Amino acid sequence: MKATLFTSLFSLATAPIASAAAVFYNVNSTDNLYELALDGAYAWTDPQFATIQSTCNATNVRMINAGLQDSIEAASFARQRLLEKGSNDDVYKKWFGDGSIYEVLGLISYLVEAEKSDISYRCDDVDGSCASHPTSWPGYDRESNDSETVICDLFYTSKKPLSTLCFDGTLVETGPKHYAGIDLLHRYLHTSKMSSDHYIAEYAEELPEILDYAQNNASFATRNVDSYLYYIAESYADAVIPGGCLGDVNNPPKSDD
């Protein structure tokens, strides 16, 4: 990482609050994506991106890059909320309880600014898992090489841009991974490098259990992937849509599993 976390925090401390909702960028190259990430009130100092392999066609690349742009935008809103409201914030307490804000702030920044040249996306379903799960797997990390993430065709048809946030229902109803940018953040954490050999992991995925972690096991809430995804999604929704669109956490939809 070229820039320190403290540089990033200082640059954002005086940043004006963004007023416009997210835009679903159609960008074709990582160079353009990098420039977009440096632009705007919540810009990152040194964003880093995974490589997109040649197995992905031009449309794949455009849509993955659009999701990556959304991911850094969503993460920037979450980071700004942490800086402005701290750990006494109701949204923070809901997902992390009294867990360490330094862990949360550090991971969100790390997701965007950690060096990722050895992490890549591919689109050729090399292990056949997309074909085996055509209606349920938008992507998968390879067991033989978890630095590679395969993006399935379902990703392009099922994942939505942040500009449509709340249009398909509340976050409780859709889940944060309904949105491409947030789904891509979660896919980083399937790699050993970004999860610190799975120190950060999917310990709890169902909403009641995620909420229980925050109240009764905060040290694991700050290590739980889905706790971060809900915090990022709710922070973004609350910033760009009056009142946000979390929904009723006491009545989540039943899992299909």
Image (tube, grey):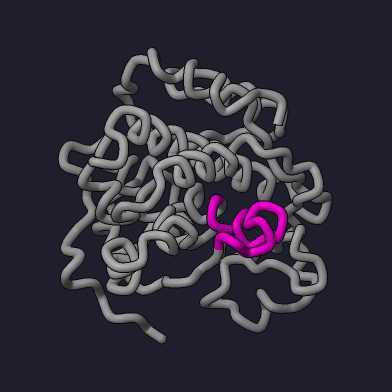
Q: In which quadrant will I find the C terminus?
A: bottom left
Splitting the image into 4 quarters, where does residue 4 fall?
top right
Q: In which quadrant will I find the N terminus?
A: top right
Specify whether 172 is left or right of 201: left
Residue at 69%, 67% (x, y): give it. 141
Q: Is residue 187 magenta?
A: yes
Visible in this render: residue 178? no
Looking at the image, which is closer to me, 106 or 73?
106
Q: Position of residue 161 (x, y in %)?
A: 44, 46
Q: Position of residue 154 (x, y in %)?
A: 56, 66
Splitting the image into 4 quarters, where does residue 153 fall?
bottom right
Looking at the image, which is closer to me, 58 or 199?
199
Residue at 36%, 66% (x, y): give it. 217
Visible in this render: residue 16? yes
> Which secondary structure type mostly characterizes the magenta part of the structure?
loop
Magenta residues, start to end: 185-200
